[in-house]
Image (cartoon, rainbow, N blue to C red):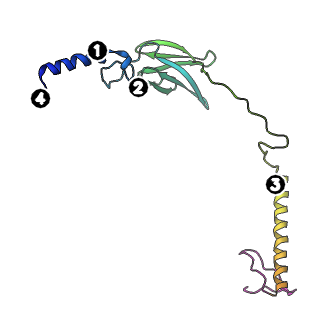
Amino acid sequence: MRLPLKCLVGLVMAVAPLAADPSLESPFSSGAGATGSSAPVAAAAGAVEFVGVLRTGAEEVVCLYDTTKQRGYWLAVGQTEGGVALKSYDAAKRQATVELQGQAQTLALKEPKFEGTVTPVAPPPPGLTVAAAAPSPADEAARLQAVAEEVKRRRALRQAAAQQAGGPPPVPPPGVPMPPRNGAGGPGPGR
């Protein structure tokens, strides 16, 4: 099916104003217009923001955000990435000097914006321990001793109950010596 030439010309003329309307651009586009080009847009002056610092030991890295490319870079002094070079960082002044398109710019650390509300958290009820401190070595030794004594007590109760029932005493786990049977000083059965 072929469309007449007049229909095609009319269709193109009707769509052309829509393509030029900036209000119809995708909200996900980089703002480069409706050219459809996937080439990266060169960062304009003022398009890079200094948004953070990370100190790892003796080294500090600075986070620079390219608003045009919508991409962030963590750079140490002297490093270059994405056309942005970090020349210096002054922690006292909270400023970074970058080179962008051959021009040096001094950027101040961008202050975060918070537009939400903060809801205070109620304190824990009295007597509730939020974070337990590590026990001292003496407390830990006393706790382990109490556990060992409780194990011995329960083992003795099991053995007494087995003897009253007339059955053989339970076999202890491997590595635990078998207690003497009925007062006999020798090893128990199976040894």
Quarter in which the C terminus is drawn: bottom right
Asked which secondary structure carries label 4, the reply is loop
Q: In the image, what residue type sits under mark 4?
A: Arg
Disc 2: which residue: 28
Which mark sits nearer the N-terminus, 3 or 2?
Answer: 2
What residue is rendered at 44% in x and 21% in y?
84
Disc 1: which residue: 17
Depth-wise, is mark 4 or mark 1 nearer the camera? 4
Depth-wise, is mark 2 or mark 1 nearer the camera? 1
Q: In the image, what residue type sits under mark 1?
A: Pro
Instruction: Give the spatial CA distance, label 3 vs label 2.
Output: 59 Å
- Compared with 14, 121 (above or below) is below
Which mark sits nearer the N-terminus, 3 or 1?
Answer: 1
Disc 4: which residue: 2
Q: In the image, what residue type sits under mark 2?
A: Phe
Front residue of this view, candidates 26 and 166: 26
Residue 2 position in % (x across, y down):
11, 29
Point out the residue furthest to the right here: 183
What is the quadrant of residue 19 in the picture? top left
Disc 3: which residue: 140
Which mark sits nearer the N-terminus, 4 or 3?
Answer: 4
Q: Determine if the magenta segment contains residue 186.
A: yes
Quarter in which the N terminus is drawn: top left
Q: In the image, what residue type sits under mark 3?
A: Glu
* Residue contact between numbered discs 2 and 1, judged by CB atoms under 8 Å: no
Depth-wise, is mark 4 or mark 3 nearer the camera? 4
What is the quadrant of residue 81 in the picture? top left
Asked which secondary structure carries label 2, the reply is loop
Residue 184 position in % (x across, y down):
85, 87
Depth-wise, is mark 3 or mark 2 nearer the camera? 2
Magenta extent: 167-191
